[in-house]
Amino acid sequence: MSSSADFVFRQLRPLFFSGDAETAHERMLSSVEMVSKIPGVIPFLRRQFREDLPVLHTKLFGKTVNNPIGLAAGFDKDGRIYPALFALGFGFVEIGTVTPLPQAGNPKPRIFRLLEDQALVNRLGFNSQGIQKLAGKLDSGTKVNSPEEADTINQSSEQHEKFSSGMLGINIGKNGDTSLERAREDYVSALSALHPFADYFTINISSPNTEGLQRLQEKQMLRELLESVCSRRDKLDQNNIRQTPLLLKLSPDLDDQGLHDCTRIIKEFPIQGVIATNTTLDRQQLKSSQKIEQGGLSGKPLKERSTEVVRVLFQELGNEVTIIGTGGVFSGADAYEKIRAGAAAVQIYTALIYEGPGLVKRVKQELAELLERDGINCVTDVIGIDS
Ligand SMILES: Cc1cc2nc3c(=O)[nH]c(=O)nc-3n(C[C@H](O)[C@H](O)[C@H](O)COP(=O)(O)O)c2cc1C
């Protein structure tokens, strides 16, 4: 059936791709949001797209997930359609970046398709409905932590079917007009408001579209930020008897020294994961005329650099910290490469735009085939074996 979903997507693709990229994305979000409210739709999607491949079962932060293929931040910034995204078969979904206060982001147009390069450039600048709205939305859903749990609670309950999920990550950022000196207050308030709903938090300090944000990756500022965020997380976890992993999302444009500084500081703090990487400012070897647009580049041209960053992180951090590889994953082979370089899991954004909803199932099947070809029984066995 996902092949018929693929067929429909390919037929409609010219239509999706004819206008402004953000308008098309918004249209998709509102249609899926609306359709998801119809009883039976989410379970139907699940039946079509979800596939259980035992070789892909893995653990992230001590929790079992169905597979190591996740949705990257920015696709569903305000948590509008995450139940449908889980139904497509992602093992984990990251919503956000959400900022404490609602904000509009940069002027439009601000997303560009680089068709010949299978890439996107965006300069959205954290358009966000803000943490209060997101907390309200998440609070109104019955969040269940794993598909298995959901299934044991009540198979026939539409509400549980709708919100049952794999792992839900929340990516947090700062408002555009918050100074860098006060940035940590924004991260702390986002963390506090959303703590009950997140299976993990990603601290986004690497978007190139919020002025100065990437400076939070510098030694002193990173230390101060992590001091505040970790101590707040620890307090909240203690009061609520839970453990919430904190992940740091890094830029592919850090040089060797910058990366090394980050890993050194990560080792000083109780940080459980790193996402490598966000979008790049690099524009080498692109064909599309849209390459002149300012913003962060994602998709195929980012693949090698993000894998390289995964490799460096794995060499420096080993298994102490979970690495998630993000950038240009379009196939099972791309995912396999990142996992062998050191990623425990991967995330996808741009390929989903180009390939449509059947992509997730295809990537999982291809990855499972590669593992079987190599005589591997469990995906975790290959993490970092090429580094
Ligand atoms: C349109 C767009 C918006 C994005 N918004 C965010 C965001 O809000 N926060 C974030 O951490 N990353 C954001 N990203 C970056 C992605 O999460 C991902 O790190 C990057 O696109 C590389 O993966 P890909 O090549 O599979 O797209 C965005 C990417 C795109 C294309």
Image: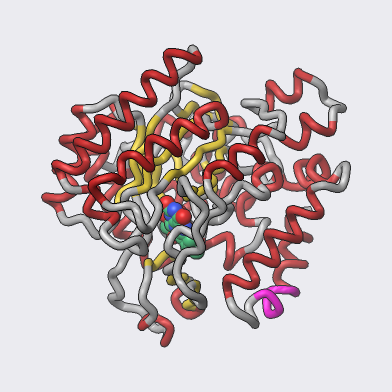
Task: Note whether 21 is above or below 210 in the view shown.
Answer: below
- Please state which of residues 21 and 187 is positioned toward the viewer in this rendering: 187
Q: Is residue 15 magenta?
A: yes
Quadrant of the image occupied by residue 51: top right
Instruction: Tell me if residue 148 can be seen.
Output: yes
Q: What residue is drawn where x is 79% and y is 53%? A: 1
Q: What residue is drawn where x is 39% and y is 68%? A: 297
Q: Is residue 344 left or right of residue 66?
A: left
Q: What residue is drawn where x is 58% and y is 74%? A: 21
In magenta, the rendered stretch is 12-16
Query: Quadrant of the image for the C terminus?
Result: top left
Q: What residue is drawn where x is 64% and y is 38%? A: 136
Whole-percent x, y for residue 321 in the image: 31, 30
- Please state which of residues 108 and 268 is positioned toward the viewer in this rendering: 108
Whole-percent x, y for residue 39 in the image: 88, 42
Q: Main secondary structure of the magenta part?
A: helix
Whole-percent x, y for residue 351 in the image: 53, 62
